[in-house]
Amino acid sequence: MRRVGLGVLALAAVFCVGCGGTSASTPTAPTTVTPAPAPAPAPAPSPAPTTGCAVPEAPTNVQATTVSNTATLTWTGVSNATQYVVLVGTTSGSSNTLLTNTSQTHYSWSGVKEGVYYARIEAQNSCGGGRASAEVTFTVQF
């Protein structure tokens, strides 16, 4: 068989030339492949149910007293708080010196070095932490 091109191959497939038969076969329609439909988008998540959970308010009346190298912080408790985070730093707004928690409305910190400190208290419960209290400044001097 001579190589003539695709036209001869297509003709050979329809007439079955060289396959031992002499009659022409009936061509069949080309098979059309239909792609599967795209999956439906996932439904949007439902909004979280309202549980009535609220973080505590900020503690008030934060005070600091010092005696020698011990600083005692006190504050007014918050009704729905389960613990308080005590944050103390050497610059306003920082907690680079002390970061601890307590379930009490006071905290005594011993072994404090001389210097100026900034303290604030944050109330927490199972819903999370609330805003921090107003910051108080205290000085430790021996």
Image (cartoon, rainbow, N blue to C red):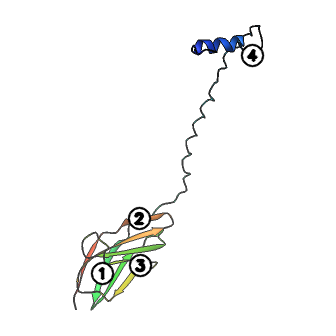
Q: Which residue is located at x 74 percent, y 8 percent?
A: 24
Q: Which mark is residue 64?
A: 1
**How far apart, in angstroms, are the residues tagged by discs 1 and 4?**
105 Å
Q: Which residue is located at x 56 percent, y 45 percent?
A: 45
- Asked if marks 3 and 1 touch (Cβ < 8 Å), the reply is no
Front-lying residue, 17 or 97:
17
- Asked if marks 1 and 2 touch (Cβ < 8 Å), the reply is no
Per the image, the residue denoted by label 3 is 105
Asked which secondary structure carries label 1, the reply is strand
| Circle 3: residue type | Thr
| Circle 4: residue type | Cys
Whether residue 56 is visible to the viewer of this picture, yes or no, is no
**How far apart, in angstroms, are the residues tagged by discs 2 and 4?**
87 Å
Please tell me whether mark 3 or mark 4 is closer to you in this view.
Answer: 4
State left or right for residue 8 relative to residue 77. right
| Circle 1: residue type | Ala
Disc 1 crowd rating (10 Å Cα; few below 14, some 14-19, many 20+) is: many
Compare marks 3 and 2 and give the one earlier in the sequence.
3
Q: Which mark is residue 19?
A: 4
**How far apart, in angstroms, are the residues tagged by discs 1 and 2?**
21 Å
Compare marks 1 and 2 and give the one earlier in the sequence.
1
Disc 4 crowd rating (10 Å Cα; few below 14, some 14-19, many 20+) is: few
Front-lying residue, 76 or 108:
108
Q: Which mark is residue 120?
A: none
Query: Residue 52: where, in percent of width, then height?
Result: 53, 57
Compare marks 1 and 4 and give the one earlier in the sequence.
4
Disc 2 crowd rating (10 Å Cα; few below 14, some 14-19, many 20+) is: some
